[in-house]
Amino acid sequence: MPEIGIGIIGGGYMGKAHAVAMSAVGAVFDTGLRPRLEMIAATSPERAQHYRRAYGFTRGTHDWRVLVEDPAVDAVVIAAPQELHREIALAAFGRGKPVLCEKPLGASLDDSRAMTAAAEASGVVNMVAFNYIRTPASQYARQLIAEGAIGRLTWFRGEHTEDFLADPEAPATWRTRGRSNGTMGDLAPHMINAALALIGPIDRVMADIETVHETRPGADGPEAVTNDDHGQVMCRFTNGVMGHLYFSRISTGRKMGYAYEVTGTKGAIRFDQEDQNALWLYRAEGPEATRGFVKILMGPDHPDYLPFCQGPGHGTGYQDQIIIEARDFLRAIETGDPVWPTFRDGMEVNRVVATAIASSDARQWLSTSSV
């Protein structure tokens, strides 16, 4: 079975997740290509060697350029800070190497445009790592909607809410500096991607974005927060569906509030990532007295569940989403077929983010085509 040399840039939170996924994906899905953990890049020689030993890579480096240029690295996974995404991706495409890039696609819309142009000019596989939409439950929701199970769509509500900065006394960090690290750059892309996947393109938005805690404790006293804490977006999809999106890093009590509701003329769907192995489905049929939302526990009959477990209701987890992602990336490389979401799909997410920010600044509805 052919091997493929994987290079991962970044060994922290997501670097580890991708390393574990590439180690496990062949056994879970019996992929045609079998990943070989060839090289990992980190910010120092010491950290690179630590991650090499911990994750099982053949080699480590403190210079991502060495990784990209190495002939034994066949495909590149970018799990570095978003400010580096553009430069790394362009270098990898210049070497003709497939790229899986963590979201968001660059630190700005301009970054994502340049990355998309380079990806499409190179002709090699390119994919953005939006993992949450790959849960069996959300895949099943997409299937139900496409099949018309809940009729003509009329309404969408989505949120990505967490509370890691709900405490006003939480100290300033990189997360509180720079617009691209704010809630609109960090959390919003996941749910915008879900909205685009479930409902379709967004035509126009009206947004209100706010920094609630304007200073936080710093090493030398209070430090100004230079990005947003939360934001809400009214939107109208191209197909006419009305929607509302909310994003927050200060939603006290919410740990992984990636949740959505989809309403149609014949039913409705609800999902909450904090209960990721369940989908709630309402069908407008039968006597009114017996109607109600039904909790569907994920099992072998749902998308991408069986390779992990044969027991209904036993559940999949966060790491499994990344393994599904790795399978899709490898399959695209093996077949040469594009895999959703491509860099162009990631660019459209960034376009909605940029339009929402511009709308909030202008205090008016804006078309996504205007940005």
Image (cartoon, grey):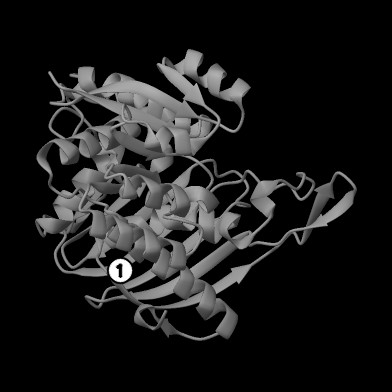
Q: Which of the 4 quarters of the picture holds residue 109?
A: bottom left
Percent position of residue 23, x then y: 32, 20
The residue located at (19%, 33%) in the rendering is 304
Q: Quadrant of the N terminus?
A: top left
**In the figure, 329 relative to 211: above or below?**
above
In this rendering, the count of numbered labels is 1
Percent position of residue 296, x then y: 23, 38
Give 65 or 235, whichever is nearer the viewer: 65
Q: Which residue is mark 1?
A: 155
**In the figure, 113 relative to 369: above or below?**
above
Percent position of residue 114, x then y: 39, 63
Give 292 or 70, whichever is nearer the viewer: 70
Residue furthest toward the right? 221
As drawn, is 255 to the left or to the right of 196? right
The residue located at (25%, 50%) in the rendering is 292
Give 327 or 234, whichever is nearer the viewer: 327
Secondary structure, mark 1, is strand
Q: Which of the 4 quarters of the picture holds residue 316?
A: top left
As drawn, is 171 to the left or to the right of 184? right
Residue 16 visible from this viewpoint: no
Percent position of residue 127, x then y: 29, 48
Amino acid type shown at disc 1: Trp
As drawn, is 90 to the left or to the right of 263? right
Q: Quadrant of the C terminus?
A: bottom left
